[in-house]
């Protein structure tokens, strides 16, 4: 459902072989594809104490291949759909718990937003949402929200909110969650606790071994030339609650949402859902392609 909510009917999740295509594949064909991987342009990642000459010798001995490698096939590109108005997507699932996701699409990557996003996710997403929806109002078994950064420069920010609650409480959860996006609850103690936790995490965590390479490659996809944690640490130390309020007001408060509801159809008040926005009922074929 999340994939459908982000991309619409044509999504990475549905980019799969049909049953007939699967049954027509042979073992030899699959093994041949695996063997052909070394003939396609690829990178070799290494972490350790070996010198360049030693590594080169090992590769020449054990990683032989053609003198000219084939180019990597062009990937399929899936475009995130624009959300111009509040919409509700419903899929039936016969269970005692209903699940509600809210999706808010943002813009393209902006490194200057990294510090405020890191602190906002901890303050609002991990603390305020849980405190307000579970501890204070007993509306949810679990509740979170996260302003998710894109993995490369071609993708967009995406805020994902999530509640798991009883089927008969789904509308209460809708109203309560929306209220948090419209008016950010203010708590000095929660804010300072979140700031301390984030600064302490950056101060004590270490990126080493193979993670050093993966961290570099992930940063490269976003056009970063240095560890973004340095910016986050320096900027977060100076932030106040006003920065959290300003961020929500600009990037969440007035944005159209895609609501995803997974629950028992007979227990859902669809007339109430239609007050939020147009409701589309999804089938298994819509979601899975079969």
Image: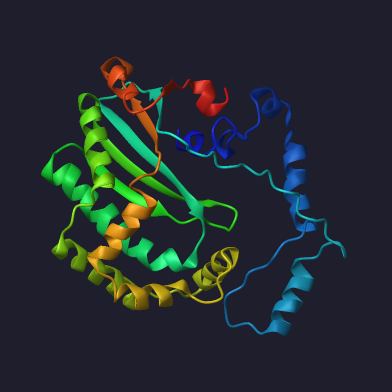
Total numbered circles:
0
Task: Give the farthest residue toward the left.
Answer: 136
Task: Give the farthest residue toward the top.
Answer: 266
Q: Is residue 112 above or below residue 257?
A: below
Task: Residue 181: give x, y in percent of width and height.
Answer: 28, 46
Q: Is residue 161 above or below residue 193?
A: above
Q: Quadrant of residue 162?
A: top left
In front of the other: 25 or 16 = 16
Q: Is residue 195 visible?
A: yes
Task: Residue 41: give x, y in percent of width and height.
Answer: 76, 60
Side (left or right) of 212 relative to 44: left
Q: Is residue 122 visible?
A: no
Side (left or right) of 269 relative to 133: right
Q: Residue at x 21, y 24 (%)?
A: 168
Q: Residue at x 48, y 75 (%)?
A: 227
Q: Is residue 83 above or below residue 196?
A: above
In front of the other: 236 or 68 = 236
Q: Residue at x 57, y 36 (%)?
A: 11
């Amino acid at each position: 459902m999340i994939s459908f909510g982000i991309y619409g009917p044509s999504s990475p999740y549905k980019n799969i072989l049909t049953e007939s295509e699967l049954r027509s594949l042979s073992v030899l064909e699959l093994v041949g594809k695996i063997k052909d991987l070394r003939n396609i342009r690829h990178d070799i990642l290494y972490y350790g104490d070996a010198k360049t000459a030693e590594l080169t010798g090992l590769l020449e001995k054990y990683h032989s291949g053609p003198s000219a490698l084939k180019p990597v096939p062009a990937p399929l590109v899936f475009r995130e759909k624009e959300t111009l108005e509040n919409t509700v997507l419903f899929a039936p699932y016969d269970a005692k718990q209903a699940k509600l996701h809210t999706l808010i699409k943002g813009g393209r990557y902006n490194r200057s937003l990294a510090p405020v996003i890191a602190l906002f996710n901890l303050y609002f997403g991990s603390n305020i949402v849980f405190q307000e929806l579970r501890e204070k109002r007993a509306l949810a078994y679990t509740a979170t929200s996260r302003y998710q950064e894109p993995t490369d420069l071609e993708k967009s920010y995406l805020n994902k909110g999530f509640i798991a609650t009883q089927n008969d409480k789904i509308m209460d959860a809708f109203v309560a969650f929306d209220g948090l996006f419209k008016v950010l609850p203010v708590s000095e103690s929660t804010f300072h606790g979140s700031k301390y936790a984030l600064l302490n995490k950056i101060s004590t965590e270490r990126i080493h071994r193979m993670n050093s390479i993966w961290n570099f490659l992930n940063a490269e996809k976003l056009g970063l030339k240095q560890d973004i944690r340095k910016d986050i640490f320096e900027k977060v130390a100076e932030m106040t609650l006003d920065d959290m309020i300003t961020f929500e007001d600009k990037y969440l408060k007035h944005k159209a949402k895609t609501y995803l509801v997974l629950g028992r159809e007979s227990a859902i008040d669809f007339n109430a859902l239609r007050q939020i926005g147009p409701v589309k009922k999804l089938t298994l074929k819509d979601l899975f392609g079969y």
